[in-house]
Amino acid sequence: AQKITQTQPGMFVQEKEAVTLDCTYDTSDPSYGLFWYKQPSSGEMIFLIYQGSYDQQNATEGRYSLNFQKARKSANLVISASQLGDSAMYFCAMRETGANNLFFGTGTRLTVIP
Amino acid sequence: NAGVTQTPKFQVLKTGQSMTLQCAQDMNHEYMSWYRQDPGMGLRLIHYSVGAGITDQGEVPNGYNVSRSTTEDFPLRLLSAAPSQTSVYFCASSYSSGTSGRNEQFFGPGTRLTVL
């Protein structure tokens, strides 16, 4: 079974608008971490935001926030005030207890329209 | 700090050839790993290491070998290249997480490998 599911292969958003990228996960581990990475067309992997399973508040990093719904096992990335430079692939990933290994979803390609 | 470096950036091999992808990090990270990225499949873990002298298999280890003789270096060896190994390879490193904490993985720039 897939540990991380990203159901949106591609998304479009108008510049300056907000967009939500979906991520659901599957684990029986009570302690885990969720990550989002950005991969621009140049290919590098850029860490964006982290949410721990026991964190009481949703994570935020600048224009990025994580809509964490533990009971639904979802960790959606919200990008506010989209910019042209936000056009990229976005990957959701999970790390389980006592491990460093990341399980990645298949990614969502975001295109920001001017 | 250079972070995580990978060489080469691009490589073309013929079926059956062997080669080593190099990875080095200067952040004194205990954990290092290799992923491959294929279209529509995200990143999949090949091998990983939690410290010098310790390696283990990930999700897709067949056809690859690794070793970790120093904290800094974690080379990936393709023993006999096959067209199915055409992919983009990423090396990553982090501190060992224990059970909690952000401790994100830092990725190298990737190696694009084509096997003919």
Image: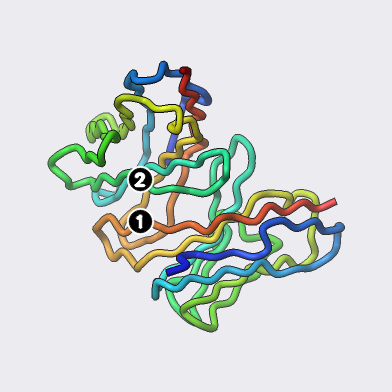
Asked whether A105 or A37 is in front, the reply is A37
Q: Please give the name of the residue rendered at 85% of the width and 51% of the height, measured from the top-left corner.
A: B116
B21 lies left or right of B58: right
Q: Chain of mark 1?
A: B
Q: Please tell me if label 1 and label 2 are on a single chain.
A: no
Q: Residue furthest left?
A: A56
Question: How many circles with numbers are drawn on the protein?
Answer: 2
Hey, which quadrant is residue A70 in on the image?
A: top left
Q: Which residue is mark 1?
A: B104
Q: Report the residue at 55% width, 63% height from top.
A: B47
Amino acid on which the number 1 mark rests in the picture: Glu
Q: Which residue is mark 2?
A: A35
Rendered residue at 34%/68% (across/down): B96
Give the residue type that dot 2 points to: Phe
Q: Residue A95 location in percent, x, y?
A: 36, 52
Q: Secondary structure at mark 1?
A: loop
Q: Residues within 10 Å of mark 2 (few under 14, many from 20)?
A: many
Alpha-carbon span between mark 1 and mark 2: 8 Å
Give the residue displayed 24% in from the left and 57% down from the top.
B101
Q: Is residue B116 left or right of residue A77?
A: right
Depth order, front residue of A100/A44: A44
Q: Tell which of A20 and A55 is nearer to you.
A: A20
Task: Locate residue A16 relative to residue A103 in the image: left or right.
Answer: left
Q: Position of residue B19 (x, y in %)?
A: 75, 68
Residue A71: where, in percent of width, then height?
22, 32
Badge 1, how many Cα within 10 Å: few under 14, some, many 20+? Answer: many
Residue B14's image quarter?
Answer: bottom right
Using the rendered image of the protein, determine whether residue A70 is visible from the camera's viewpoint.
Answer: yes
